[in-house]
């Protein structure tokens, strides 16, 4: 559902015009749109509610940097474009390429805690250079734990990369001349595999006077798309 939401938000069209369900319950994408850069300023003044997709809902599904990329591609593209994109998920397994967990780290707490990103990189460098944790590395972990115990909550991030096979039509043409700019001119379905990067922030809450085995509880967040096919070179957390 994130791709229809991104297209709806970028081109200010109803999300139901982009998202099409099928009998299997899968969400297909059917999108065709012509745009003229001369109207961009007027279009940007439209209320996002016109497109049927609340801005906050879109941001929960896709990272702000990815949304910014789509908006900039529309704004700084050719003066007149015809874009066609149709995506149908294939009845094939989705492959998990990699999955990582970054304790004590999220995009938000990099802003909250001054120097958190730098110290995290220092810790990873120390851990990679030694068979065991040095006293300097342990001091960084202790600092993170002190922040956790003081604030009673801490963010950790799960990052998962998956390959998703689809049947797809993708074509970008000059709307006036018909010149092919990107994609395939014949506008036929082709099997493609997209590399999609997801992040989920998990909040860990400290519990005072706990009676269980662990003095905290976990609060999983929403999965959010942070990159597609390395358009943002991974949109890395570190």
Image (spheres, helix red, strand yellow):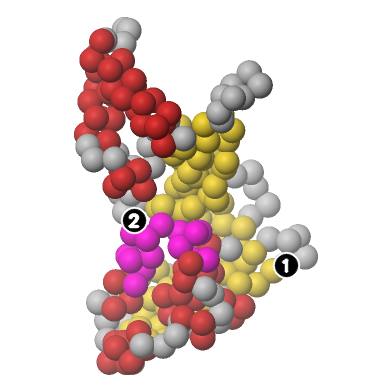
Query: Whole-percent x and y of residue 149?
Result: 43, 29
Number of numbered markers? 2
Q: CA distance from mark 2 to mark 1?
A: 28 Å
Which of the two residues, 124 or 149, is positioned nearer the viewer here?
149
The kind of secondary structure element at disc 2 is loop
Q: Is residue 170 among what the camera can see?
A: yes
Magenta residues (range): 57-71
Tell me residue 24's x, y (percent): 76, 60
Task: State the residue at coordinates (77%, 65%).
Answer: 23
Mark drawn on residue 138 = none
Above or below, 205 relative to 223: above
Residue that label 2 marks: 231
**If the image is split into quadrants, where does the N terminus sit?**
bottom right
Q: Residue 18: horizontal and vertical position, in percent?
A: 57, 76
Residue 37 placement: quadrant = bottom left
228 up-or-down from 212: above or below: below
- In this rendered view, identify the residue nearer to me: 109 or 211: 211
Q: Can residue 178 be seen here?
A: no
Q: Residue at x 35, y 43 (%)?
A: 109
Q: Is residue 81 left or right of residue 136?
A: right
Q: Residue 106: where, in percent of width, then height?
A: 39, 42
Is residue 169 toward the left or the right of residue 226 in the image? right
Q: Which mark is residue 22?
A: 1
Q: SS for tag 1?
A: loop
Vertical placement of 215 versus 47: above or below? above
Which image quarter is the C terminus in? Answer: top left
Most distant residue in the right direction? 23
């Amino acid at each position: 559902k994130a791709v229809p939401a991104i297209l709806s938000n970028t081109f200010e069209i109803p999300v139901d015009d982009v998202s099409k369900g099928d009998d299997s319950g899968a969400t297909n994408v059917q999108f065709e749109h012509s745009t003229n850069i001369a109207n961009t300023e007027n279009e940007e003044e439209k209320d996002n509610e016109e497109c049927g997709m609340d801005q906050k809902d879109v941001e929960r599904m896709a990272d702000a940097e990815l949304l910014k990329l789509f908006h900039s591609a529309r704004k700084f593209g050719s003066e007149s474009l015809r874009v066609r994109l149709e995506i149908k998920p294939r009845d094939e397994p989705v492959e998990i390429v990699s999955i990582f967990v970054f304790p004590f780290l999220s995009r938000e707490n990099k802003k909250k805690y001054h120097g958190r990103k730098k110290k995290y990189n220092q810790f990873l460098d120390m851990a990679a250079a030694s068979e065991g944790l040095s006293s300097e590395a342990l001091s960084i972990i202790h600092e993170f734990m002190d922040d956790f115990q003081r604030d009673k909550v801490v963010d950790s991030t799960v990052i998962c990369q998956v390959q998703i096979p689809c049947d797809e039509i993708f074509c970008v043409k000059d709307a006036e001349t018909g010149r092919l700019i990107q994609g395939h001119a014949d506008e036929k379905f082709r099997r493609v595999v997209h590399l999609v990067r997801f992040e989920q922030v998990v909040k860990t809450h400290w519990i005072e006077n706990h009676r269980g085995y662990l003095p905290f509880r976990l609060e999983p967040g929403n999965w959010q798309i942070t990159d597609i096919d390395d358009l943002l070179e991974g949109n890395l957390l570190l």
